[in-house]
Amino acid sequence: MEKISLEGLNIKPSDIRLLKNLGEAYFFQNKYAKTVDTFEKYLKYSYQTNDTYLPTLYYYLGYSYLQLKSYYKADIAMSMAQHFKKNNILHYIYLGQINEQLDNKKKAYQFFQTALKMDPNNSTAQEALDRLKDFAEQ
């Protein structure tokens, strides 16, 4: 998919269908910097306000920024993913991890708490709550 998308973008660099395919190809190969560059181009060229791909795109962007340790950008992107697609446990888990890295411990605790309410058996959320228990009442 990467090779074909790159060939197509040589012909039409603003084709959001090709940018979507290329961004996903990079994401699933753990090429997070390239994922970010590609999806930022997608946003630049996408003019649709009702684009159904935006929740997925912002999730990929948020996760990629998290892996690149760009925590403020990760927070914005993952928050956008959560805004577009409510009640996705992964959004809350990653928002918790991002805010923990940003030293927003109380906010991180709240995100993990929400995730655990959604899935009481989620070990990632439970371990985080145990780690952040001092911030529960602040």
Image: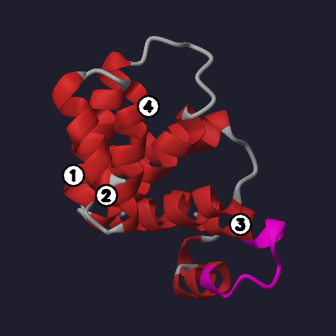
What's the distance in space between the residues labelled 4 and 1, CA to CA?
Answer: 16 Å
Looking at marks 3 and 2 on the same chain, the residue that comes earlier in the sequence is marked by 2
Q: Residue at position x 58%, y 23% from top?
A: 51
Mark found first going from the N terminus, 3 or 4: 4
Q: Marks 2 and 1, how far apart in space?
A: 6 Å
Residue closest to the eye, 74 or 132: 74
Separation of marks 3 and 1 at Cα, in angstroms: 29 Å
Find disc 2 in the rendering and name its residue: 26
| Nearer to me, 3 or 120 | 3
Give the residues in magenta: 116-124
User: What residue sits 54% from the left and 57% below the top?
Assistant: 107
Residue 3: x %, y % from top left: 25, 52
- Horizontal side of 48 relative to 41 (left or right) equals right
Say which amino acid is labelled 4.
Arg
The amino acid at mark 3 is Ala
Q: Is residue 123 positioned above or below 16 on the image?
A: below
Q: Is 122 covered by the magenta stretch? A: yes
Residue beneath label 1, please?
34
- Observer-side mark, 3 or 2, equals 2
The residue under label 3 is 115
Measure the C-alpha gap from mark 4 to mark 2: 14 Å
Residue drawn at (73%, 43%) of the image: 86
Quickly name the residue at label 4. 17
The answer, for residue 20, to whether it is visible in the render is yes
- Residue 40 lies, in percent from the top left, at 29, 33
Callout 3 secondary element? helix
Considering only order in the chain, which callout, 1 or 3, is on the residue closer to the N terminus? 1
